[in-house]
Amino acid sequence: MTVAPVDAGDIAHWDAEADVVIAGYGIAGVSAAIEAARAGAEVVVLERTGGWGGAAALAGGFVYLGGGTPIQKACGFEDSVDNMRTFLCAAMGPGADEDRVADYCAGSLEHFDWLVDCGVPFKPSFWPEPGWEPPDDDGLMYTGGENAFPYNRIAVPAPRGHVPQMQNKRTGEQGGGYMLMKPLVDTATALGVRSIVDTRVQRLVVNSNGRVVGIIARQYGTELAVRARRGVVLATGSFAYNESMVARYAPRIAGRPAASIEEHDGVAIQMAQALGADLAHIDATEVAFLVDPQLIVRGILVNGRGQRYVAEDTYPGRIGQLTLYQQDDTAFLVLDADAHEQAMGARSATPFLLRPPTWVCETVADLESEIGLPTGSLQSTVAAYNDGAVKGDDPLLHKKPEWLRPIGTPVGAIDLRGNTGGFTLGGLHTSLSAEVLHVSGEPIPGLFAAGRATAGLAAWGYASGISLGDGSFYGRRAGRTAATA
Amino acid sequence: MTVAPVDAGDIAHWDAEADVVIAGYGIAGVSAAIEAARAGAEVVVLERTGGWGGAAALAGGFVYLGGGTPIQKACGFEDSVDNMRTFLCAAMGPGADEDRVADYCAGSLEHFDWLVDCGVPFKPSFWPEPGWEPPDDDGLMYTGGENAFPYNRIAVPAPRGHVPQMQNKRTGEQGGGYMLMKPLVDTATALGVRSIVDTRVQRLVVNSNGRVVGIIARQYGTELAVRARRGVVLATGSFAYNESMVARYAPRIAGRPAASIEEHDGVAIQMAQALGADLAHIDATEVAFLVDPQLIVRGILVNGRGQRYVAEDTYPGRIGQLTLYQQDDTAFLVLDADAHEQAMGARSATPFLLRPPTWVCETVADLESEIGLPTGSLQSTVAAYNDGAVKGDDPLLHKKPEWLRPIGTPVGAIDLRGNTGGFTLGGLHTSLSAEVLHVSGEPIPGLFAAGRATAGLAAWGYASGISLGDGSFYGRRAGRTAATA
């Protein structure tokens, strides 16, 4: 299927038109729609599935916000724009786009207010436990390792994962992502935003001046030409489910997409590339580590050489990235029977992420041999860890004292090789105004993008809430810029 | 400066023309020129500098060849196409393009014959020592860690770094890269290939059917329009010196390009992107580790946690990659005074890569403290290494017994933090026929590419000789395909 642009002169009839045409009705699309409509534009959203939602509605719902939000303050945390920026520059790198990080941090408080104004509910309560998500309806959590080594020595720890208040979470009725999307879509609808569903975008329409003036889409086998009087916004999500793109750009997660949806086929990225659009950080990926943090924090993680490599009390997505990219996707979680039992009973544990031990032995030497680790390696690692734990100290990785306890016997290990999956973080290179940039550096007239079809804050690292965060933040920019283009 | 394509209808006058127009007179360009000329095409090469050479002429000159070349056989090494492929699939990954690797391996013997037929001299003698290059005129060397862990357990070790016989190497007169390029350029010249020097390519010229029919270049401030009757071949090298591209695609080597030349500005990659060309493995980089392997092999390398992470007797470029990407560019080489002295006297040592120890101490505990490593970490690592070394065994990393010797005192360490540099390996996505592929998947008519402006064999890993290898191999393909297009 070609994604090459179509000449506007070849369009005999427009099937629909609006000032701003948005492809994709997830977090970036709805944010763009609201702001474009508020700027006075007529807006239509083309959505591939049967309705709004995108990956966002199925996500945990974290939005990464800080700088001293009312929720942070109510929960007793100090934060500032500078402090947030310092953390993100360290955690999103190496190679994080400092201008974009600074821009995002400077606008974070206003963005929180905007979400609340649109009706997104945040409960001012903090969930303090290790985990991927709060078990109930708490509104704030650490989601990037801010309070763990090394970041707790780089910036003042502050939780910034803001999750909309959920209803009946334990029954799975209305998760955080749904509670984020629903009020935003209601807001857009009230502003007159229309949507055309079951419609896949395929090609951009360009006039003789090189300006994007529409989009070709397909609905049940019928081609639709949709005219955009002011601009097109691409908000179709990542390329995690485009096998060919993953093979060339992010082969580490090939065959193992996770935490994404199959609609994330990268087509809008390619449609823009066909016009000469540039890419950025196209190799970056989020990496899920599919085991409960309540287990991880109570043990030690070792690589294929029996060496520890990460503070076990940090953000599990960071553990996933370090495991996949730096340890050849090889990890073993070593913990004793007591620790395993405690984790199994933790209130916030997620049943499908709890695991029985793969091996259980009477001694560390036996376990080392069972796993097949180099002779002496795990014994030396456990001995050093236990020596420190007795004193409440972890000189190697600075796990916090509250989680330090010598590993006793019987001792087991969970085999976590090949235990990662991920979604892609890179995409179109955009300006801070959400214009899609040509490889020559200038904006492509009439073309805008946001969300995971673009490179956002992450150059390598990640924190939960970054995608819904930069997707909504730059989605708004895209809508405003397109409406006034 | 725009790299947007120019409409052929806007060209009033062609300043030059040929059947095949090649941008760049390095290894890929000269190989393309020879094959295009032999296929009956009139060929002109546009070169940015004052003459032929490119990065190739300044390089060590290794060409990665195998499968049982006459040089391998004369030196007593067995190899096969399958064995070579098995090694490359492991060493160029994760994500190595298996079809391309298989194609390259299948053609390797014929490619060796082609080089020899063009007059490239290879001396059938093997240099067995660790190092970046042979000290004299030997023609064969291990250049990818084939004989070290883990690759020596994946494929039968065979050296494949073929270096043209040098003249007066120790005085720097005619290095391997020069001895590779000179006979190839002589061959091209004898075939009637013309070159236009001091000429920078800027934009591609496209006709109304989307076919590339020429190129716009600049010579001393004057614009030249050069018509290509059959095709344009892009062979301008990497983007290592394009700061903006490095920041977005390969930020780990930002500010530290190495082993490349300043002409590697990525412009041809962008010119093709402006036509919708796709990219592949754009994040991949070669990584030089700037210390003599004669030092490395006699010590142990530890990371910032005092842990070993790589067999010290492997290819130093692999050590560089693992250090930069997996150890946060942090390495310390620990070795005792005797080992340091032996390395300084090694016949193949390179003077500017030899280093004095940064620290020297009476005990490992003191050294650990001086370096600032976690308490106990280095002591434990050295004790384990020494335990094995006494028995001729390295259970952790399988360094070969010939290099195992317990580390005694006085003991020192060389600070190798921030000691890497590199050039980029990714680029345009091409077919095995060297056609530049559009993001839609089909070839862009009239446009071909080879060398480091394209993604070659490496998806992540590397071996010395891969760039001159795939540059010459697919350069030939580009020339043939373009001449018959």
Image (spheres, coloured by chain):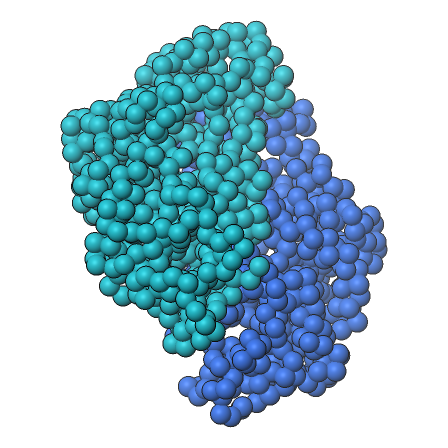
Chain colours: A cyan, B blue
The one nearer the camera, B439 or B91, is B439
| Residue at 65% from the left image edge and 62% from the top image edge | B431
| Residue at 53% from the left image edge and 23% from the top image edge | A332
| Residue at 31% from the left image edge and 47% from the top image edge | A30
Whether residue A130 is visible: no
* Quadrant position of the C terminus of chain B in the picture: bottom right
In the rendered image, the vertical position of residue A334 relative to residue A470, given as above or below: above
* Quadrant position of the N terminus of chain B in the picture: bottom left
In the rendered image, the vertical position of residue B224 relative to residue A45, given as above or below: below
Can you give x and y, in whole percent of width and height, for residue B118 in the image?
76, 73
The one nearer the camera, B240 or B340, is B240
Can you give x and y, in whole percent of width and height, for residue A343 in the image?
42, 14
The one nearer the camera, A218 or A28, is A218
Whether residue B459 is visible: yes
Total labels: the figure holds 0
Quadrant position of residue A338:
top left
Can you give x and y, in whole percent of width and height, for residue A424 in the image?
46, 45
In the rendered image, the vertical position of residue B135 relative to residue B77, given as above or below: below
What is the residue that sits farthest to the bottom in this orientation?
B13
Quadrant position of residue A167:
top left
| For residue B369, side relative to residue B276 (left or right) | left
The one nearer the camera, B259 or B30, is B30
Can you give x and y, in whole percent of width and height, for residue A464 in the image?
36, 36
| Residue at 63% from the left image edge and 17% from the top image edge | A369
In the rendered image, the vertical position of residue A120 relative to residue A478, given as above or below: above
| For residue A446, side relative to residue B408 (left or right) | left
